[in-house]
Structure formats: structure tokens, C-alpha cells
């Protein structure tokens, strides 16, 4: 295993700092969060999961009908991709619900 030399200026730039360690842009906390982009990212992710499930269902149906262009391996791989995507979406949803519950139960 060969290690690359550490590039300090690149690491500092990635962290959003100047070479002396001061922040490049002064922003207030929470100012950089874009609610619309988060919402659109979640919508896009759910649409992707739905698309994977529809594709898996289509391949499964085509395989059952005996389409010679659809293999069992291709069908099973697509079904596993759809299942993993659904489980990931479910996990994210459960974490959001748990975080919401934790925040609502906090003492003020």
C-alpha cells in the first residue's frame, strides 16, 4: 500500500477555510441549509425507489410469461436492488420519526 503525501492546502480548501484557518465565508448557523433542495432530494430518492420496484415487477412479469430476452439472474438482481432501496427508504423514514419524537419529548 502506497500512501500519498498530505496536501494541506487541498484539505483546508475542502473544509471551507483559508490557509490561516479562518472561515472563507461568514454565515450564520443554519443559513446554508436549503429546504427546497432537501425536499427535492427526498422526492427524487422516493421516485427512484418506486422506479426500481416497477422495473423489478415488470421483469418478473416478463420472466413469468416466458420472454426469452429476460433472464432469471437479471430479474433476481433487479428484485434485490428494489428491496435494498425500499429498506433504505424505510430506515431513513424510521430515523426521521425517531428524531422527531426525540425533539418533541425534550424538556424546554
Image: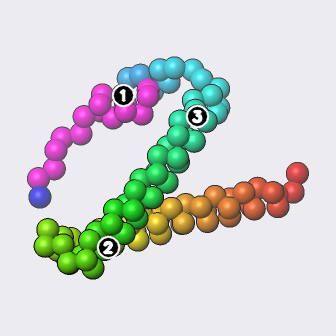
State yes or no: residue 10 in magenta: yes
**Residue 57 vs residue 79, the one in the foreground:** 57
Pointer 3 residue? 36
Pointer 2 residue? 61
Q: Secondary structure at mark 1?
A: helix
If the image is split into quadrants, where does the N terminus sit?
Answer: bottom left
User: Which circle's residue, 3 or 2, is located before the other in the chain?
Assistant: 3
Region in magenta: 2-17
Q: CA distance from mark 3 to mark 2?
A: 37 Å
Closer to us: mark 3 or mark 1? 3
Residue at 45 percent across and 58 percent down: it is 50
| Badge 2 vs badge 1, beta-carbon distance below 8 Å | no
Q: CA distance from mark 2 to mark 1?
A: 51 Å
Mark carried by residue 13: 1
Q: Is residue 53 depicted above or below 8 in this figure?
A: below
Residues packed near mark 1 inside 10 Å, few (<14), some (14 to 19) or many (20 plus): some
**Residue 80 vs residue 31, the one in the foreground:** 80
Tell me where residue 7 appears, x and y as whole percent: 25, 34
Residue 77 visible to the viewer: no
Q: CA distance from mark 3 to mark 1?
A: 26 Å
Residues packed near mark 2 inside 10 Å, few (<14), some (14 to 19) or many (20 plus): some
| Badge 3 vs badge 1, beta-carbon distance below 8 Å | no
Q: Is residue 27 depicted above or below 44 in this figure?
A: above
Q: Is residue 19 depicted above or below 4 in this figure?
A: above
Mark carried by residue 59: none
Tell me where residue 81 appears, x and y as whole percent: 34, 67
Q: Secondary structure at mark 2?
A: helix
Residue at 36 percent across and 69 percent down: it is 57
Q: Residue furthest right?
A: 108
Residue at 27 percent across and 79 percent down: it is 64
Closer to us: mark 3 or mark 2? 2
Amino acid at each position: 500500500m502506497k500512501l500519498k503525501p498530505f496536501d494541506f492546502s487541498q484539505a483546508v480548501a475542502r473544509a471551507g477555510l483559508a490557509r490561516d484557518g479562518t472561515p472563507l465565508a461568514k454565515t450564520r448557523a443554519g443559513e446554508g441549509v436549503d429546504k427546497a433542495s432537501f425536499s427535492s432530494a427526498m422526492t427524487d430518492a422516493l421516485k427512484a425507489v418506486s422506479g426500481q420496484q416497477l422495473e423489478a415487477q415488470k421483469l418478473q412479469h416478463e420472466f413469468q410469461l416466458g420472454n426469452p430476452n429476460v433472464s432469471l439472474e437479471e430479474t433476481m438482481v433487479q428484485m434485490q436492488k428494489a428491496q435494498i432501496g425500499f429498506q433504505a427508504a424505510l430506515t431513513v423514514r424510521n430515523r426521521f420519526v425517531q428524531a422527531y419524537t426525540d425533539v418533541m419529548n425534550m424538556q424546554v
